[in-house]
Image: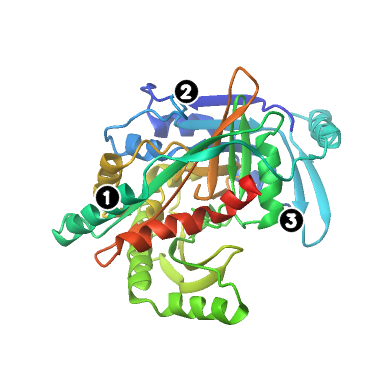
């Protein structure tokens, strides 16, 4: 990939206002530049928002995120790119798009990104990616105790739902790059909202199945919250039975509905009055290692609002915080280590004003050390509600991590 033409960062100790920062970073956006005949992203801003950015937006107490005690990660990174390569895997096409002050600059941007792609070697690393085994940060019994404590808080009326997670850390073996992990995940089970972002000595590898928020050039907003999980079955019959069980589960349906209501509320902050609609409720989606319940909520963006406004009004995603959101975020901060990129978002804001973003689940945060190896952290969690069972919730974290574990250790 070619280098970005501009980079801006909000660090942990930064005192700048996030809304003003994003407004400045997206000042290049021109709605008249929107093109419906081109891919969704034609150049513009690519960014990573950590979970702790949501705490900042709510003016809550924050902690720095580090991998194994290393350097502090930023809470928001945005990079502006003048050229993109858009792969359409269904049509089997590749589109190169460049931008600039004139045609010559746009063509030069295209030439640079195409040359970078052609010069990128094909990875030979497809197995045995770890140098040392992943270390579990929170023991099984400790996580189960935390689930039980959270259930007691829910019964006491402190909140309705909170997403509780735990992490794993490790190190890739010498010569293995985060891009190799991404390639292996794509081969083992590609996800619709997966992504990869390199930020100098740091990288994000995501195999996320979940969209956070999409904003079209026409102003239509869509979010697709996931809540409710079952493992895939060993046989076709068992697999179908697990899917049916998830669809029929009162607990999982209630868990999903709470987050749908939360996202309806969040979208209403930036939507035209009366435009928020639930267009899909409790749909079953199946991935290589899990079944999920997925819903969809849409709305029409209020006149004068932008993608930057949407991010500031709705972040962090409701599906990985809880309900009520602020109270759930407070509980999460008391029970977990800092999350960093996990449960944050990768996003783009197109030069024409459109946006799309994922929820950074099934995700690894990677950091390069002075010896040339990559340290990694991954995490998995689940929504805890009044009838959650501690052992089942602990097992769910292992189910969600299973594909990443398989790719790293096979």
Q: Return the x and y of residue 138 as percentages of the image width and height.
A: 37, 43
Camera-side mark, 2 or 3: 2
Camera-side mark, 3 or 1: 1
Q: Which residue does the numbered mark 2 point to in the structure image? A: 70
Label 2, label 3: how far apart the Cα atoms are: 45 Å
Label 2, label 1: how far apart the Cα atoms are: 26 Å
Whichever of callouts 2 and 3 sits on the residue coming sooner in the sequence is 3
Q: Is residue 310 left or right of residue 207?
A: left
Could you say which disc has been placed on residue 40 in the image? none
Q: Which residue does the numbered mark 3 point to in the structure image? A: 37
Dot 1 crowding, Cα within 10 Å, few <14, some 14–19, many 20+? some
Which element is circle 3 on?
A: loop
Q: Which residue does the numbered mark 1 point to in the structure image? A: 146
Q: Which of 184 and 405 is in front in this view?
A: 405
The reply to whether residue 270 is in sight is no
Which element is circle 1 on?
A: helix
For the point 58% across and 82% down, the residue is 237
Whichever of callouts 2 and 1 sits on the residue coming sooner in the sequence is 2
Marks counted in the figure total 3
Instruction: Mark 2 and mark 3 in contact? Answer it, CB < 8 Å.
Output: no
Q: Quadrant of residue 154?
A: bottom left
Instruction: Mark 2 and mark 1 in contact? Answer it, CB < 8 Å.
Output: no
Label 3, label 1: how far apart the Cα atoms are: 50 Å
Figure quadrant of the N terminus? top right
For the point 82% across and 33% down, the residue is 103
Instruction: Mark 3 and mark 1 in contact? Answer it, CB < 8 Å.
Output: no
Q: Return the x and y of residue 158 as percentages of the image width and height.
A: 17, 54
Dot 2 crowding, Cα within 10 Å, few <14, some 14–19, many 20+? few
Whichever of callouts 3 and 1 sits on the residue coming sooner in the sequence is 3
Which element is circle 2 on?
A: loop
Dot 3 crowding, Cα within 10 Å, few <14, some 14–19, many 20+? few
409 shown above or below 239: above
């Amino acid at each position: 990939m070619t280098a970005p033409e501009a980079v801006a960062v909000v660090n942990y100790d930064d005192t700048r206002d996030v809304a003003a920062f994003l407004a400045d970073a997206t000042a290049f956006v021109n709605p008249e530049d929107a093109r419906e005949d081109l891919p969704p992203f034609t150049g513009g801003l690519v960014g990573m928002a950590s979970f702790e950015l949501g705490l900042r937006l709510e003016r809550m107490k924050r902690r720095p995120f580090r991998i194994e005690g290393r350097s502090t990660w930023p809470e928001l990174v945005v990079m502006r790119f003048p050229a993109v390569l858009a792969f359409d895997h269904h049509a089997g096409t590749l589109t190169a798009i460049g931008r600039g002050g004139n045609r010559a600059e746009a063509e030069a941007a295209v030439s640079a990104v195409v040359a970078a792609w052609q010069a990128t070697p094909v990875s030979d690393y497809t197995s045995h990616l770890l140098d040392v085994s992943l270390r579990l940060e929170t023991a099984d019994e400790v996580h189960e105790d935390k689930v039980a404590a959270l259930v007691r808080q829910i019964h006491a009326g402190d909140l309705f739902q909170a997403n509780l997670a735990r992490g794993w850390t490790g190190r890739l073996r010498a010569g293995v790059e985060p891009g190799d992990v991404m390639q292996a995940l794509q081969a083992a089970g590609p996800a619709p909202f997966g992504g990869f972002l390199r930020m100098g000595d740091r990288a994000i590898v995501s195999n996320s199945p979940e969209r956070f928020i999409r904003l079209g050039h026409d102003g239509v907003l869509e979010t697709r919250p996931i809540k409710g999980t079952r493992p895939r079955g060993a046989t076709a019959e068992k697999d179908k039975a697990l899917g049916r069980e998830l669809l029929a589960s009162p607990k999982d349906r209630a868990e999903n509905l709470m987050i749908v209501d939360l996202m309806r509320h969040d979208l209403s902050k930036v939507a035209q009055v009366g435009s928020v609609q639930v267009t899909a409720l409790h749909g079953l989606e199946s991935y290589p290692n899990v079944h999920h319940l997925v819903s969809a909520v849409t709305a029409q963006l209020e006149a004068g609002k932008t993608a930057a406004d949407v991010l500031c009004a709705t972040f962090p995603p409701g599906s990985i915080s809880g309900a009520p959101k602020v109270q759930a975020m407070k509980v999460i901060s008391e029970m977990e280590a800092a999350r960093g990129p996990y449960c944050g978002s990768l996003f783009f804001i197109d030069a024409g004003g459109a946006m799309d973003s994922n929820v950074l689940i099934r995700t690894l945060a990677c950091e390069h050390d002075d010896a040339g190896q990559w340290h990694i952290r991954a995490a998995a969690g689940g929504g805890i509600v009044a009838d959650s069972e501690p052992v089942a919730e602990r097992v769910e974290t292992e189910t969600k991590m299973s594909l990443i574990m398989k790719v790293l250790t096979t």
